[in-house]
Image: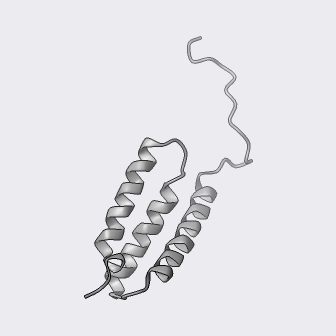
């Protein structure tokens, strides 16, 4: 019997919880973690590996970092500047 942390559906449930937390929080804080957990889930589902907890956490951290860096590249402003509003919405 495999350990509980090697179950793919548990990682998928964690990804869902992190995605819900992303909707409830401002910014793109939890989205990278949710994508990392989803990637670990798909890896465990497709390969059927029975990895140890430290190795799975390292894989989760690496995939989350890669997802966060990709999201930062995709969603960043072209000049990395803060958007400024000149007009008030009530005017």
Left or right: residue 19 versus residue 86 is left
Q: Residue at x 49, y 72 (%)?
A: 60
Quadrant of res 89 = top right
- Vertical side of 20 occupied by 49: above or below: below
Of residues 23 and 56, the one drawn nearer to the viewer in this rendering: 56
- The quadrant of the rendering that contains the C terminus is top right
Q: Residue at x 64, y 51 (%)?
A: 76
Left or right: residue 59 versus residue 15 is right
How many numbered tags mark residues here? 0
Residue 67's spot in the image, x, y percent? 54, 65
- Vertical side of 28 occupied by 3: above or below: below
Quadrant of res 8 = bottom left
Of residues 24 and 66, the one drawn nearer to the viewer in this rendering: 24
Q: Residue furthest left?
A: 1
- The quadrant of the rendering that contains the N terminus is bottom left
- Vertical side of 10 occupied by 22: above or below: above
Q: How is the image coloured?
A: one colour
Residue 17's spot in the image, x, y percent? 36, 55
Residue 74's spot in the image, x, y percent? 59, 57
Quadrant of res 70 = bottom right
Residue 18's spot in the image, x, y percent? 41, 56
Q: Residue at x 49, y 75 (%)?
A: 57
């Amino acid at each position: 019997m495999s350990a509980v942390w090697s179950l793919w559906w548990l990682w998928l449930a964690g990804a869902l919880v992190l995605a819900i937390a992303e909707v409830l929080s401002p910014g793109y804080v939890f989205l990278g973690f949710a994508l990392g957990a989803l990637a670990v889930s798909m890896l465990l589902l497709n390969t059927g590996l029975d990895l140890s907890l430290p190795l799975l956490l390292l894989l989760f951290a690496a995939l989350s970092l890669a997802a966060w860096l990709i999201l930062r590249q995709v969603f960043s402003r072209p000049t990395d500047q803060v958007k400024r509003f000149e007009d008030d919405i009530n005017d």
